[in-house]
Image (spheres, grey):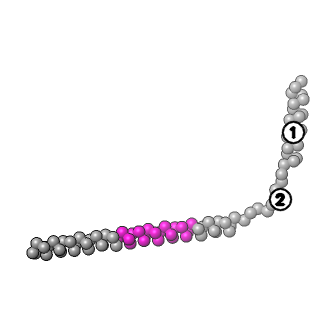
Amino acid sequence: MKKFIALPLIAAAALGLAACSHKSDEAPVDNGAAAADLNAAASDAIADVNAAGADATATADNSLDAAANGADAAAADANVANGQ
C-alpha cells in the first residue's frame, strides 16, 4: 500500500523539479580573448625566466673571472716574494 502512494508522490516531485529548473538565457562566453591574454602572460613569464637565467650566468662568469684574476695576482705576488 505504501508503494502505491510513494510512487506517484516521487513522480510528482520529479516533474515539479524538472519544471522549475533554471534555464540559462545567457549567450555562450567567447574565451578567445582570455586565451590570448593567458598566452601573452605565459610568453612574458618565459621571457623573464630566460632573461633571469642569462643574468645569473653572466654574474657567475664575472665572479669566476674575478676569482681567477685574484688567484693570478696572489700567485704573482708569491713569485715576487720568493724572488722568482
* Vertical side of 40 occupied by 3: above or below: above
Magenta stretch prevailing secondary structure: helix
Q: Residue 23 is drawn in which quadrant?
A: bottom right
Q: Nearer the viewer, residue 53 or 40?
A: 53
Question: Which residue position holds label 1?
Answer: 13
Which amino acid, by three-letter code, is at mark 1?
A: Ala
Q: Are marks 1 and 2 in contact (CB under 8 Å)?
A: no
Looking at the image, residue 61 sits to the left or right of residue 3; the answer is left
Question: Which residue position holds label 2?
Answer: 25
Label located before the other in sequence (1 or 2): 1
Residue 59, magenta (yes or no): yes
Looking at the image, residue 2 sits to the left or right of residue 69; the answer is right
**Magenta-tinted stretch:** 42-61
Residue 68, magenta (yes or no): no
Which amino acid, by three-letter code, is at mark 2?
A: Asp
Asked which secondary structure carries label 2, the reply is: loop
Locate the C terminus and report the quarter of the image it occupies.
Answer: bottom left
